[in-house]
Image (cartoon, helix red, strand yellow):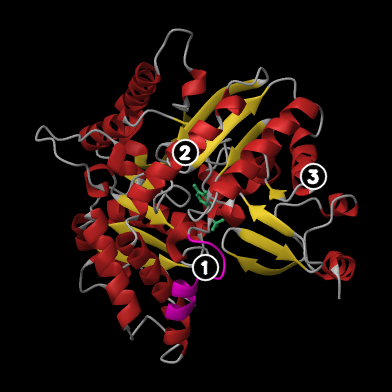
Amino acid sequence: MNNLDWQRRTRASVWHPCTQMKHLEGLPPLPIARGEGPWLLDQDGNRYLDAISSWWVNLFGHANPRINQAIIDQLGRIEHVILAGCTHAPVVELSERLADLTGLSHAFYGSDGASAVEIALKMSFHYWRNRDKPYKTQFVSLRNGYHGETLGALSVTDVALFKDTYAPLLRQTHQWPSPDWRLAEPGESAEDYARRCADQAEAYLAECADSTAALIVEPLVQGAAGMAMHHPVYLTRLRQLCDAYEVHLIADEIAVGFGRTGTLFACEQAPSPAAAAGPTRVSDIADFLCLSKGITGGYLPLSCVLTTDAVHQAFYDDRVARGFLHSHSYTGNPLACRAALAVLDIFAEDKVLAANREKAGRFTARLAPVADHRRVRHFRQAGMIWAFDVEHAPPHFAREFHRRALAQGLFLRPMGNTVYFMPPYVVGEEEMRLMADVTLQLLDSL
Ligand SMILES: *Cc1c(COP(=O)(O)O)cnc(C)c1O
């Protein structure tokens, strides 16, 4: 069976995500037969560089021998078991290691990012109820924020294309201005703008803290907003405000966790909010940390909400209803947890963060002609994420750019007029050259 056969069959039977199915008439999906490192191979034997890590999930390449081996080993022991009434080594070890890495001591598991967001929102609300503050029921998020597509997560998402149709089904939530530095006034630094946004947040809390349970943010990079980046001091200021006004801070690191922004977790880049400055830990910033996407290296669906002793303690009681009675069938799946443990091993054994810093420097240098191109605005980078906006973008720019890059073996999905690279960490010189060269050429021809 070749590409054409699979394209016909998939259009007849598979309802593809985030897709107007009619558009597949002109641009059918790639039938992928196998993966090798950062490369995808289709049924006809063509190869494409997976420059967006299969929707931001892949870290160490496709068919990674070490992650494969961890899963194969786990398959021979136990593939899955109920986590209510049972436990197992992979879920305990993963929870302990994530607690060590973040300072957040308790881990609750789900399967997708959106379910982690639901869990964090419900836990925050229920915490205030258990602490005799049942009037704290409202959530705040940021303009252009993205937190997933289920009804609760969509309520705190602020992307009109995904949200407007379903507005009658959603909870009302409040959005604060985005600290995205592209929105700074002329002459205003990214840091000054971040502080100004935090001041506006304070004005809101001064009035509405009593009804507010939690604030949810994407630390450092608002991914679906078009890789909008902000100054890390914003996170420090939010923590100080959340302390002063008794509001939870939910850090949604579903996209930015696991090294994407250069540190293992993005919150670590915030200047320490405490007077005694030391390296910042996630627990210095967040009451809840949502993780998914890269957690299994892009292998298996797994998400996790990490939280504090203080939150856990508020649920610890003889009365059943004060417990957190939430569940998903595949909670804490052993295969997924073993993949996640293999990912953490690779980070430690290969000193991945240091290697990425060096690699990122080389790719940024290679992208200099793109950054300097006359049509490029707001070239930006954080760790292993690069993005820029294209001026005078023709209609359907994103789809056309995607189609033409694909013809040259590069798989990208621009958002509006923003082009971004978010490659697996295993890209080498050949891959960096391909991304830079094809992009430069398309900027001149499209
Ligand atoms: C992808 C994403 C989600 C949703 O995760 P899913 O696994 O797609 O449900 C939530 N928040 C952020 C920041 C994301 O990037």
Task: Give amino acid for label 2.
Answer: Arg
User: Label 1: few (<14), some or many (≥20) within 10 Å?
Assistant: many
Report x, y in % for residue 317: 20, 70
Image point (82%, 29%), residue name: 395
Find residue 403 and name its label.
3
Q: In this view, does 396 lie to the left or right of 353?
A: right
Image point (85%, 66%), residue name: 3
Task: Give amino acid for label 3.
Answer: Arg
Task: Give amino acid for label 1.
Answer: Pro
- Camera-side residue: 299 or 218? 299
Location of residue 140 by image quarter: top left
Query: Which residue bears the numbered disc 1?
Result: 301
Q: How far apart are marks 2 and 3 (CA)?
A: 27 Å
Location of residue 37 by image quarter: bottom right
Do we see residue 137 in this rendering? no
SS of the residue at dot 2? helix
Mark closest to the chain's N terminus, 2 or 3: 2
The quarter in which the C terminus is drawn is top right
SS of the residue at dot 3? helix
Report x, y in % for residue 91: 34, 75
